[in-house]
Image (tube, helix red, strand yellow):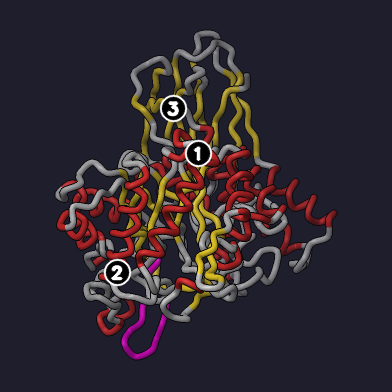
Amino acid sequence: MNINFQGKSKPLNHIWSACVGAGRANEGLRADWQSHLSKAVKHGGFRYLRFHGLLHDDMHVYKIVDGQEVFNFQYVDALFDAMLDQGIRPFVEFGFMPNDLASTERTQFWWKGNISPPNDYAKWANLISKLVEHWIQRYGLEEVKNWYFEVWNEPNLSAFWDGTKEQYFKLYQVSVAAIKAIDDRLRVGGPATSNFVPDARFDGELEDISTHLTLVTEELDSLEWKGVWIEEFLAFCERKKLPIDFISTHPYPTDFALDGHGEFQGRSRHASSTKDDIEWLKRVIASSAYPDIEIHLTEWSSSPSSRDYSHDYLPAAAYVVKTNLEVSDLIDSLSYWVFTDVFEEVGAGPAAFHGGFGMLNLQGIPKPTFHAYSFLNQLGEHELARSEGTVITRTDNGELRGLFYNYPEDYKGTVPMSVYPDQTVAQTAQSFGISRTFNLVVEQVTPGGQYVLRTVDRDHGVAVQLWNEMGSPNSPSREQTEQLIAYADQLNERKFTADSNGRLTLDFNIGPWAIALLSEEV
């Protein structure tokens, strides 16, 4: 590949740094969570943060006392102040239901987030209005206009919404009306559904487990996958003349399904299934009454399990890079779930490394996915060339940045799940594949310019391996933590020099699943 560094380019959409996820709002009041966020924003460049539980009772936003509604936004203020001070804005998810506004007692997670529809939709709308008005008073309309407001989380799943499809649509209707009544320029969307499915399980008002096809079909890619509630949601909004500023949904490539006989299992699809899902989504939106709305995929990872050891290993990093680059021209954000293992949906992590979603573990030790987002963030704004495994860019400052990855050609699937406490599947996947050679020439760079290629591979940046060698300490000592962080940050480096004519010749190998960033030393 020959590239003219001063030649034509096209804009590179940095969807990877638009938004990132976190567990729940109350965790954001912790010192370690805020420290990890600072590191994630600094290296990943993230501009928005989304999380659950903003309205949960542990944030103390809403109570009924002596028959009167009482609003208290102090905890929310403390969290949003801390986020904005670090340069990251809220991608607001409205949920869970305050207990005094709940219609049932059904909850989710050990911290008991209430998942029911409101017992009074007018009171729900008033709560939303009070919150948004408070934010405008505190931060100013010009700031809040930059935020996004998403109504609920995964209402198609009975685990997150103890109601029907129609009840969720009503929740959206009253929510968007309340927000737009304050200022029509505020951005509201949904339906935040999960996942893409190949069957009719979500076609009715409630999930029908008897129609699940995932476990009874040997070849998943033979099925036609589609988004959940997207078409119905768009049609409902058109019928009711409701505004939508963005569609949100969660295209995890792993489907958890029942076979109708009680058997439950997660199965992963092919490596480019996220791109397939987004292309389906683009077609549906283009043919709707809202063809120009934004697309925000507000949760995504190689699997929707916080006890999946694949999250701690190298292949997940290659998957992150490959997928983000594949879909960068199609959407507005692909939000990684999540930035930190300070995450308690099923309780505290049982060990320092346990397959948590985070790109940083509880002790703040970077995982390979952390480097993946750091590398993506360092790419330039102008794309010069791209091929499978390669993207070459130029920054606004005129610096060369290239990103390379080796997703093994013979590995057709998404990174497989490796369920805690067994690391075997993750380790076996990481051992698969062969090295790949990259040959390219970049012309018209600075004569004699110095460049460095930093690589995350099997022997560099995979801290879980050193942790295993230490005996897998449940809570590493301070000294061990320092060693693990140093190990995670010690990447392989190789230097290159442009010749006197401004010609940079790159000829190198990287191992299977490796990711590598080329940057100019200035």
| Mark 2 or mark 1: whose residue is earlier in sequence | 2
C-beta proximity under 8 Å, tags 1 and 3: no
Quarter of image, res 519: top right
Q: Counting other residues with Cα less than 10 Å from the Cα at mark 1, is it few (<14), some (14-19), or many (20 or more)? A: many
| Mark 1 or mark 3: whose residue is earlier in sequence | 1
Q: Residue 244 at x, y = what percent? A: 27, 49
Left or right of 370 on screen, residue 100: left
Gap between marks 2 and 1 measured at Cα: 30 Å
Task: Report the residue at 63% width, 67% height from top.
Answer: 354
Q: Residue 69 at x, y = what percent? A: 50, 65
**Given this view, does label 2 or label 1 mark the residue nearer the observer?**
1
Residue 264 highlighted magenta (yes or no):
yes
**Given this view, does label 3 or label 2 mark the residue nearer the observer?**
3
Residue behind mark 2: 220
Extreme residue in the bottom direction: 261
Left or right of 151 on screen, residue 307: right
Query: Is residue 13 visible from the viewing direction of this image?
Result: yes
Q: Residue 72 at x, y = what percent? A: 58, 58
Name the mark on residue 381: 3
Name the image quarter holding the C terminus: top right
Gap between marks 3 and 2 measured at Cα: 37 Å
Task: Report the residue at 69% width, 47% height from top.
Answer: 35
Q: Counting other residues with Cα less than 10 Å from the Cα at mark 2, is it few (<14), some (14-19), or many (20 or more)? A: some
Q: Amino acid at mark 3?
A: Glu
Task: Report the residue at 34% width, 19% height from top.
Answer: 8
Name the mark on residue 376: 1
Q: Which residues are magenta?
A: 254-265
Q: Which structural element holds mark 2? A: helix
Name the mark on residue 425: none
Q: Which structural element holds mark 1? A: helix
Q: Amino acid at mark 1?
A: Leu
Picture layout, residue 144 above or below residue 189: above
